[in-house]
Amino acid sequence: MKRMRGKHSFLTRLRHDTAGNTIALVAAAIIPLAGMIGGAVDMSRLYLVKTRMQQACDAGALAGRKAMGGGGWTTGTNNGSTEDTANKLFNANFVTGAYGTGTLINTFEESNGTVTGTASVIVPMTLMRIFNMTERNVSVSCTAKMEIPNTDVMFVLDVTGSMATDNKIGGLKSAVKCFYESLLRVNTTEVCGNDPTATSSTTTAQIRMGFVPYSVNVNVGKLLPNAFLADDWAYDSRRYGWDGVTYDTNNSASNWTYVSGSAVTGNRYEGTCPSNTKSSSDVTSPTTTTTAPDGTITTSYTITRTTTGMEYESSTSGGWNNRKYYCTATTYTNYQERQVNSTVKSPHYAYTYERRTLNVSGLKAGGDTWNNSIPLDVGTAGATTNVVWKGCIEERHTYQNTDGTPGDEWSPVPAEALDMNIDLVPTATSTYNSFWGPLLNGATWARYNWGYSNCTKSGRTTSSVDTSCNASSSSVACPTEARKLTTYNTPGPFESYVNSLSTGGNTYHDIGMLWGARLMSPTGIFASENAFTPAGRAIQRHLIFMTDGDTNTTNTDYSAYGIGYYSRLQAQGNLSDTQMDNMTDARTAALCTAIKNMNITLWVISYGSGVGTATETRLENCASPGRYYKASDGAALIARFRQIASEISELRLIN
């Protein structure tokens, strides 16, 4: 009992004696405390290293993918390759040995347009070493690619006659195909350099492309519903007919025909002939006049001649020394014969060359389908002939200049210039002026042609068809048919269309720009197709306008406003070529402003060496800020189109 009490007393005393306990407690806690502090310090270092290395990896991947642009991945060190670019930006953000790290390994690779980077580094531990944790390996990965948002791209392409020189049209076709490769990362038959390998697009975005080739006109008519074209349209044409006044007169007399009596000729006898005793008297009948249903007037009368007496006819035989004379007598006894005299006045049918309204509703086949020709009474002698329609159009009502200076009237655009209204939709209740008409060169004639004397200036002629006066053989250019915005997930249809582009005609920039905007506008004639994607998503819009030269117009071209010299739709007076150029430039500038105000990015490319300084200035002002480019040749044009494709894409980190 004493021993237990003693022990209890000791424990009790120890419990109540607090002297020196702190040292023991601290000693007991120092090991777990060291682990906590060391872990926090080393974990902070690991987190910092991983964060900074991830940032460096992301920066390198983005830089490498951006350097690729629309091209391919290149490798190497200190050689400006895309791999070198990625590594340099990584190293600029995370240097070897940073934060006390050890061995650093980083790599960047590319596959199908996606750049992937990996990095790892050894991080030595500090206080955690006491727990036998000497180092940790930190690794990160990153992926960057060009992701395309829902995008519409409209190509407005100059295909005028000058594009045929130096094979510029070939360079354009190559550039457009390389644009397709760069944007969709799908291989075409074109050799663009670092071509992708994919044969079809894998993007989940809606990517649509459309085309408006232009020269004097644009071929857009058959893209429109029937309801958008007028049933009747005025042309510089002709009609064949009679004016009700002018006749062609033909006088004729029939041969004399026997009526009664006799005329008896006797045998020839030798001797000289006596004098004739033959005499004739004529009796003329009253004149009769008849009018045929076709307007031909025939006036006729009859002459009856009675002959009596003797008529002698002498003859000879032999030479000078033995000549003989003979006589033959004819006896006329109340011999009557008759002759009919006529005057026929035929209506004079001729061609009248004039402004004429023709019914063109026969081109409409219902809905969005069209007939390719229409029967019209404009053939030889007014015959009905099939007039072919390729698809080019005449524009709706425009503003008519009256002072001879049409270049200063398009800022702002006059309200009556319905043709410049991009979004105006014709409806059943719309004014006739809001519709379009088909361009029918086979039904259009010049009333005067300086190069051909047989094109009458007065407007009426008796000449037959003269092809030199018909618009079918004058300066008419109807380019390759335009294309509405369409998805091209495989390159075949895209390349087939681009290869079909042909050249010809003068340069009217305004008509190309106008219809490029119309075909892609989200609020115009195709709003139901263009406003949103089928899923209701927003769409980014880009119009790429390319030309190789200055505006080049003339009033003898059959343009979207008829033959200017005759139609006078754009001006009351006869505009010179310079005045027409100035007007076209002013209209184009107004359209550029309107397009940019529609939140459409307007890219403009000047191609070749044929563009004047003043035109280059206008083109640069036309483009959205920073979106004007020059390309001296085909190779430069390819580079520009690929650059635009790269800039249209959005660079994004996807991992």
Image (tube, rainbow, N blue to C red):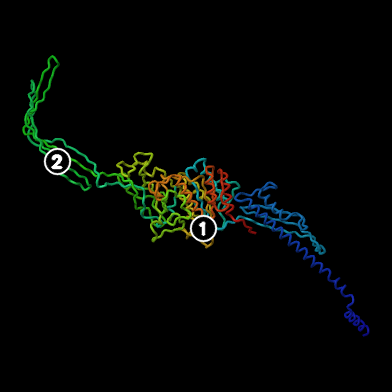
Could you tell me if residue 321 is visible in this image? yes
Rendering quarter of residue 538: bottom right
**Image side of residue 414 versus residue 175, left or right:** left
The kind of residue on which mark 1 rests is Met
Examine the rendered structure and indicate whether residue 635 appears above or below residue 17: above
**For the residue labelled by badge 1, is the local secondary structure a helix, a strand or a loop?**
loop
The tag earlier along the polypeptide, 1 or 2, is 2
Where does label 2 land, which residue? 301
Between residue 327 and residue 129, name the one nearer to us. 327
> Residue 282, percent across and down?
10, 36
Quadrant where the N terminus sits is bottom right
Q: Residue furthest front?
A: 403
Between residue 181 and residue 261, name the one nearer to us. 261
Residue at image location 77% in from the left, 66% down from the top: 40
> Residue 507, percent across and down?
47, 46
Where does label 1 land, which residue? 598
Residue at image location 12% in from the left, 42% down from the top: 286
**CA gap, disc 1 and disc 2:** 82 Å
> Residue 216, percent across and down?
45, 47
